[in-house]
Image (tube, grey):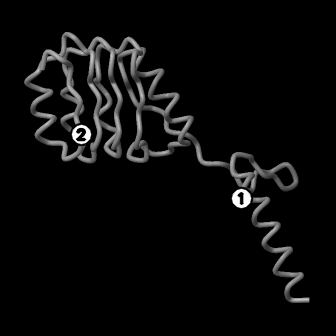
Amino acid sequence: MKKHILFVIVVISTLLSGCEKYTFTFNEQPVLEPPELLSGYKIPDPALAVCVEQAIKDFAVTRANQLSQLNCSNAGIADLSGLEIFTGLIIVNLAQNQLTSIKPLLYLPNLDRVSLEANTSLDCSDGQLLSEQVEGQVKLPGHC
């Protein structure tokens, strides 16, 4: 009998864990709602804004420091302003964009892997400074 009850509990908890994206109601009143995705941040560059928004959806990010990966290669990004609030970023791919400055990346304490390859107008002094700050790998454009 105890095994049967334990089995039922395991099955129910497994089923409910797969329903975390749904709102549950009782008598048409919400009793359990999924956490809201992060919003309200400001990123001026439209291409970077689209990339960050997609990453927030993909990784179900509810707080800025939860975003740990960002893959925005070949996206037409020219400005990284606003990215500095995502202090949990560890892996960032910004290869093949139109970046000239990467100052917001200098404020991200957890970076471990950064790709800036093929940003032909990038200011190399910021790239070198980032390479010194990051313990992991920083791939700079060929002219740096």
What residue appears at the point 7 percent right and 24 percent down from the top-left corner? 125
Seen in the picture, residue 124 relative to 17 is either above or below; the reply is above
Indicate the secondary structure of the residue bearing disc 2: strand
Residue closer to the observer: 84 or 100: 100
Residue at the far front: name it: 142
State the image coordinates of residue 49 (x, y, percent, origin top left): 43, 22
Question: Mark on residue 137?
Answer: 2
Type of residue at label 1?
Ser
Give the side of residue 35 with respect to residue 5, left or right: left
Residue 119, located in which quarter of the rendered image?
top left
State the image coordinates of residue 75 (x, y, percent, origin top left): 41, 15
Indicate the secondary structure of the residue bearing disc 1: helix
Q: In front: mark 2 or mark 1?
A: 2
Residue at the far bottom: name it: 1
Residue 74, located in which quarter of the rendered image?
top left
Question: Mark on residue 17?
Answer: 1
Seen in the picture, residue 133 relative to 97 is either above or below; the reply is below
Give the side of residue 128 with respect to residue 99, left or right: left
What residue appears at the point 23 percent right and 45 percent down from the top-left corner? 136
The answer to whether mark 2 and mark 1 are in CB contact below 8 A is: no
State the image coordinates of residue 52 (x, y, percent, origin top left): 44, 28
Seen in the picture, residue 55 relative to 17 is either above or below; the reply is above
Residue closer to the observer: 22 or 8: 8
**Quadrant housing the N terminus:** bottom right
Crowding at label 2, few (<14), some or many (≥20) Cα neighbours within 10 Å?
few
Give the side of residue 53 with respect to residue 123, left or right: right
Type of residue at label 2?
Gln
Structural distance between the alpha carbons of marks 2 and 1: 37 Å
Query: Quick one: label 2 or label 1, which is nearer the N terminus?
Result: 1
Residue closer to the observer: 57 or 141: 141
Q: Give the total of numbered labels.
A: 2
Residue at the far left: name it: 125
